[in-house]
Amino acid sequence: MKHVFITGTDTGIGKTITSAWLCKHWQADYWKPVQSGLDGGTDSQQVAYLSGALVHPETHCLSKPLSPHQAADIDGIKIQLSDFALPQAQRLVVEGAGGCMVPLNWRDTMLDLMKHLGSCALLVARSGLGTINHTCLSLQALKAAGVPVLGVVMVGEQGRLSNAANREAIEHFGEVPVLAELPLFSDTSPKALAEFSMPERMVRALESL
Ligand SMILES: Nc1ncnc2c1ncn2[C@@H]1O[C@H](COP(=O)(O)OP(=O)(O)OP(=O)(O)O)[C@@H](O)[C@H]1O
Ligand SMILES: [Mg+2]
């Protein structure tokens, strides 16, 4: 079984779109261990719609769109690392909540969940100005925690002057490859995601897991 843990430099950075795209092209199942916020649909529902992937049930579904430690408190739930076990799948895309320092409780963060699951991380970052700092800080946190990193996916408008330079700086200072650059889709549809094929370096990296 191969799996990859999708984390991001921020919430709302494109982890779910990236996860759906990976599920579609890598023919993987999807699992969101912790969903915070249920109004307006869940990440699992979005990935199922966009990719048609088999979706495994969340371990914790929390009603408020807040950091899991706070959302769990409000729902009267105590999240523990021992609650989480990887579902059975040949290939699995796991999507974290927010970024890698997001707390699950007052002791453990997403980094601890990655370690608990024995995951390799794929970091989703935006492509535009400011990304070098956020991306390199996230990579340092992953490294310090001893979580292996497969690479970075940059998400944003394509053809911008700064993108190539940002990519080069992330690879140099972060010491990891940028495996793909996802465009901003004008219509985020199953067809648009299916038509944007996976670069060869991303295919090779996933197969190396
Ligand atoms: N490549 C893209 N093209 C078009 N829209 C995008 C793209 N990436 C993200 N978006 C939009 O930005 C918003 C946030 O993206 P997404 O839900 O993937 O973020 P996330 O990192 O999964 O957030 P969360 O931390 O809530 O799980 C969504 O409305 C999504 O449709
Ligand atoms: Mg998401």
Image (cartoon, rainbow, N blue to C red):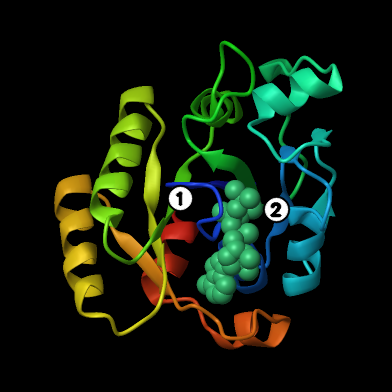
Give the residue displayed 43% in from the left and 50% down from the top: 123
| x and y percentages locating residue 112 in the rendered image | 53, 23
Taking 197 as reference, is 119 above or below it? above
Type of residue at label 1?
Leu
Q: Nearer the viewer, residue 184 or 148?
A: 184
Q: Report which quarter residue 168 is drawn in.
A: bottom left
Q: Which mark is residue 80?
A: none
Please indicate whether residue 140 sits to the left or right of residue 205 in the image: left
Precedes in sequence: disc 2 or disc 1:
2
CA separation in Å, label 2 and label 1: 18 Å
Give the residue displayed 31% in from the left and 62% down from the top: 178
Type of residue at label 2?
Gln
Please indicate whether residue 120 sits to the left or right of residue 96 in the image: left
Q: Which residue is mark 2?
A: 90
Q: Report which quarter residue 161 is drawn in.
A: bottom left
Give the residue displayed 60% in from the left and 70% down from the top: 21
Q: Report which quarter residue 146 is drawn in.
A: top left
Taking 125 as reference, is 96 above or below it? above
| x and y percentages locating residue 28 in the rendered image | 68, 61
Judged from the image, the secondary structure of the residue bearing numbered disc 1 is strand
Q: Is residue 17 visible?
A: no
Q: Which residue is mark 1?
A: 122
Mark 2 vs mark 1, foreground winner is: 1
